[in-house]
Amino acid sequence: HDRIHKEYLQKMEDLERERTVLEEDKVQVDRYKQLLIKQRDIMIALTSRLNERDDTIMKLQEELDAYDRHQRMMEDVLDQKTAAFIHLQRVAMEQATNPDMKARLVQCEQALTAEGAHAGASIADAANDEVDTTLFSAAE
C-alpha cells in the first residue's frame, strides 16, 4: 500500500505541476492576446492616419497641378502680350517722327529686352503705360 500511496502522491504532484504550468500558460496567452489587441488597434489607427495623409497629399498634388496649369497659362498670356507690345512698339518707332518720342520708345524697348521675354508683369505694364502715353501724346 505504501508504494501505491507514493505513486498516487507522485501522480497528484505531477497533475498539480501540470495544472500550475497550464494556468501560467493561460495567463501568458491572455497577456499576449491583450498585446495583440493593442497592436491591432494601433495598426488600425496608423492605417487611418496614413489614409488621411494620402488624401491630403492627393488634394495638395491636385492643387499644385492646377497652380502649374494656371502659371503656364499666365506665362503664355504674358508671352503673347509681350510679343504684341514689341510689335506695337516697333510699329510706333517706324512711324515716329519726333526724336524725343523715338528716344522714349528705344528706352522702353531696352527695358523690356533687358528683362527677357518673360519680363515681370509690372515691367510690361510700365512699358505699356509708357507706350500708351507716348502714342497718345504723339496723336495730339
Image (cartoon, helix red, strand yellow):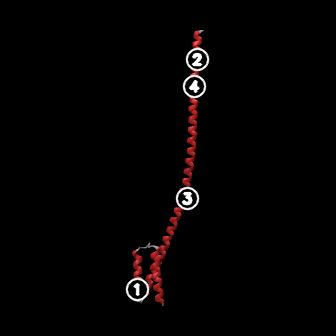
Asked whether residue 88 appears in the rendered view, the answer is: no
Under mark 1, the amino acid is Lys
- Return the residue nearer the eye: 138 or 76: 138
Mark 2 vs mark 4, foreground winner is 4
Q: Residue furthest bottom?
A: 140
Under mark 4, the amino acid is Thr
User: Residue drawn at (52%, 67%), measured in percent from left and top?
Assistant: 70
Mark 2–mark 1 Cα distance, whole angstroms, equals 120 Å
- Marks 2,1: beta carbons within 8 A: no
Q: Element type at marker 4?
A: helix
Residue 130 numbered mark, or none: none
| Above or below, 2 relative to 125 | above
Q: Element type at marker 1?
A: helix
The residue that mark 2 highlights is 11
Under mark 2, the amino acid is Lys
Asked whether residue 137 appears in the rendered view, the answer is: yes
- Marks 2,4: beta carbons within 8 A: no
Mark 3–mark 4 Cα distance, whole angstroms, equals 58 Å
* Callout 3 crowding tier (Cα within 10 Å): few <14, some 14–19, many ≥20: few
Q: Element type at marker 2?
A: helix
Q: Quadrant of the N terminus?
A: top right
Q: Earlier in the sequence, mark 1 or mark 4?
A: 4
The residue that mark 1 highlights is 102
